[in-house]
Image (tube, rainbow, N blue to C red):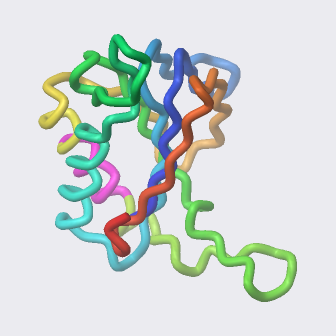
Amino acid sequence: MRVLIQRVTSASLTINNKVHSSIANGMVVLIGIEEADNLEDVEWISSKLVQLRIFNDSDGVMNLSIKDINGNLLLISQFTLHATTKKGNRPSYIKAAKPITAIPIYQATIECIEKKLGKSISTGVFGADMQVSLTNDGPVSIWIDSKNKE
C-alpha cells in the first residue's frame, strides 16, 4: 500500500461538477492499493497517518499529529500511485489491485482511520472520475509505502 500525504489548509473533491467532500485544516491522503495488501497494511498505514507529526506546534516546529490538532482527513483512492514507468513512456498499472481486492481494503482503511482518529473522515468514491483541489500547507508532501515500512 502506498500513500501520498499532503498537509493542507483546505481541500475539496468534486464529482460530476458537484462537491462530494471538502475539508479544512488537515491532510489529503492519496492511497494506492496493490494485490498483495492486507489488513496488516491497513493497520500499519492507518496508525502511521494518525500519529505522523507533520503539523506545527506553537514554536512552528512540525511536532503535532492530525489527532493532536483535531484535523480533518480526506482519503482518495488512486491506483496510479502504483504506476511503473521502467519500460517505455506509457505507465503500467499491473501492480495496482483490481477492484474486487482494492474496494474492501479501501473500506477497511476508512474504518480503521476513523477508529484511530475518533471521528469520521471524508472520502472520494472508488473508481470515480474525481477532481481534487487543495491548498498544500508548507508545502508538505510525504510518501509512505507499507511494504518498505517507510
Q: How many marks?
A: 0
Please name the predominant secondary structure of the magenta segment in the image. Answer: helix
In the rendered image, the quadrant that contains the C terminus is: bottom left
* Membership of 110 in magenta stretch: yes
Q: Where 32 sits versus 56, above or below?
A: below
Position in image of residue 42 (x %, y %):
24, 58
Residue 34: image x %, image y %? 43, 71
- Relative to 18, is 52 on the left or the right? left
Side of 47 where 12 appears, left or right = right
Rendered view: 16 above or below 84: above
- For image coordinates 34% across by 79% down, the residue present is 36
Q: Residue at x 56, y 21 (%)?
A: 11
Q: Residue at x 65, y 42 (%)?
A: 129
Residue 9 x/y as whole percent:
53, 16
Residue 44 position, x and y percent, is 22, 58
Which residue is outermost to the bottom? Answer: 87
Q: Residue at x 64, y 70 (%)?
A: 83
Nearest the viewer among 17 and 70 is 70
* Quadrant, the N terminus: bottom left
Above-or-below relation of 29 to 127: above
Q: What span is in magenta? A: 103-111
Observer-nearest of 70 and 52:
52
Q: Residue furthest front?
A: 59
- Residue 59 in which image quadrant: top left
Does the magenta-highlighted stretch encompass residue 119?
A: no
Near-viewer residue (16 or 81): 81
